[in-house]
Amino acid sequence: MEREVILRNALNVYGHRAQILVAAEECAELAQALLKYTRRDGTVAEIDAAYHVREEMADVQIMLDQLYILFGKPRDWERRKLERLAHRLTQDA
Ligand SMILES: [Mg+2]
């Protein structure tokens, strides 16, 4: 099944509210994985932590793609925030 079809089916089958809640949960899981990764110590646990970060990134991307369908892509916000970041970088670099 095509990616877009899968995402739209998930929204239709589980409902918008449920998928919004899952998106919030997946964001929290990514945050937790990132925090755990920062505690890495050069052991095998570091590889596991990076693996888990990538897994949670995939979960968040899938949910973010569903949020794009529900709310639209925030291209204007991204452009403005990237411009602001670029401006800060010229001041901080
Ligand atoms: Mg997850």
Image (tube, rainbow, N blue to C red):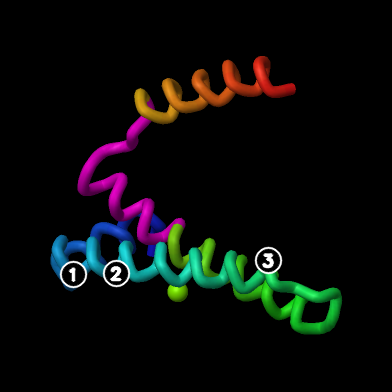
**Frontmost residue, 91 versus 22:** 91
Question: How far apart are the alpha carbons under marks 3 and 2?
Answer: 24 Å
The crowding category of the residue bearing disc 1, from other C-alpha atoms within 10 Å (few below 14, some 14 to 19, many at least 20), is few
22 vs 82: above or below: below
* Amino acid tagged 3: Thr
User: Residue 26 at what x, y percent from top left?
Assistant: 39, 68
Which residue is drawn at the image coordinates 84% and 81% (left, top)?
Answer: 43
Q: Amino acid at mark 2?
A: Val
Identify the mark at residue 22; answer none if there is no mark: 2
- The three-letter code of the residue at mark 1 reads Ala
Give the residue number, with chain letter if any, for mark 1: 18
Q: Residues within 10 Å of mark 3 (few under 14, many from 20)?
A: few
Report the front residue among 5 and 23. Answer: 23
Determine whether the residue tagged by mark 2 lies in a helix, strand or loop.
Answer: helix
Q: What is the CA distance from the residue labelled 1 to the residue labelled 2?
A: 6 Å
Please tell me which residue lies in front, 20 or 91: 91
Examine the structure image and report whether residue 65 is included in the region drawn in magenta.
yes
- Quarter for ligand 1? bottom left
Where is residue 86 shown, x and y percent of the image? 59, 20
Q: Which residue is mark 3?
A: 38
- Res. 6 image quadrant: bottom left
Q: Are marks 1 and 2 in contact (CB under 8 Å)?
A: yes
